[in-house]
Amino acid sequence: MNDPETQSPQSFLWGNFFQRDPEKDIFTLLRGVPIFEGLSRSDLKAVERILHRRKYHAGEYIFREGDPGLGMYIIEKGEVSIVSESRSTEISRLGKGEFFGEMALFNERPRSASALAYEDTKCFGFFQPDLSGLLETRPRIGVKVVAKLASILAERLYKANAENVRLISRLALKDMP
C-alpha cells in the first residue's frame, strides 16, 4: 500500500501528506493518561521533553520484583504483564495509554511486582529526577502532576482497604462455629 511502485502519481504525492504518524504524536496518548489530565498542549510539550522512550521485546523484563523503584512507565504501544514472581501469578495486563510503577516516583522501595513485556512494547519512562526537575523548573505543571498522582494513589489505597475489609469479614465468617 505504501509501495511507490504500485501507487498512482496523485496517491504517491498526496496520499500520506495530511496523515498523522501515530508513533510521533504522543500528545493524544499523554492526554489520555490520568496523571496528565487537565494539562494544556504546552504543558504536555514540557512533559514530553523529559520522558524517556524505551523499547522492550516480548518476554523482556522492564523491571523485576525486588528491584529499587526509580520511576513509572506509560505504555505507548504493546502490552505489559504485571507479575508477582513470589506467588507465580499475573496481577494485571496493561495496554496502550496505561501506566505502572508510579509509586516509585515517591520512594525507592523495592518493586512489589515485576513488569514484563507481554509483546513487543514501547514505553515512556518518567523517573524521579524528571519529576524533581519538573517541580523545580515548571512548578505549576509539577504540582498538577503530583496532585493527580496523589489522587490516583489515594483512590487505589481506598479500594485496597475496602477489599481488605471484605476479605477479613469473609475470613471471620468462615471461622465462626
Image (cartoon, grey):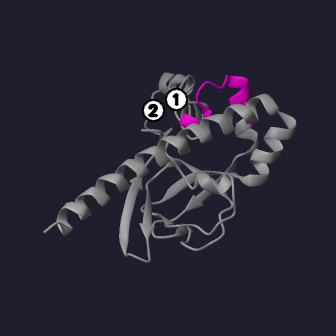
- Residue to which mark 1 is pinned: 12
At horizontal 37% and vertical 65% (from top left) the residue drawn is 90
Assign the N terminus to one quadrant of the image: top left
- Write down the region rendered in magenta: 34-46
> Label 2 amino acid?
Gln
Q: Which mark is residue 122?
A: none
In which quadrant of the rendered image does the C terminus lie?
bottom left
Residue 124 lies, with reference to residue 143, above or below; the image says below
Which residue has dot 2 on it?
7
Q: Between residue 156 and residue 27, name the one nearer to us.
A: 156
Tell me where residue 71 appears, x and y as whole percent: 66, 56
**Is 33 placed left or right of 167 in the picture?**
right
Task: List x then y, in percent, for residue 13.
Answer: 56, 25
Would you identify the image quadrant in which residue 39 lies? top right
Residue 26 point in image, percent of width and height: 60, 36
Q: Residue furthest front?
A: 177
Secondary structure mostly seen in magenta is helix
Q: Are marks 2 and 1 in contact (CB under 8 Å)?
A: yes
Q: Is residue 53 left or right of residue 112?
A: right
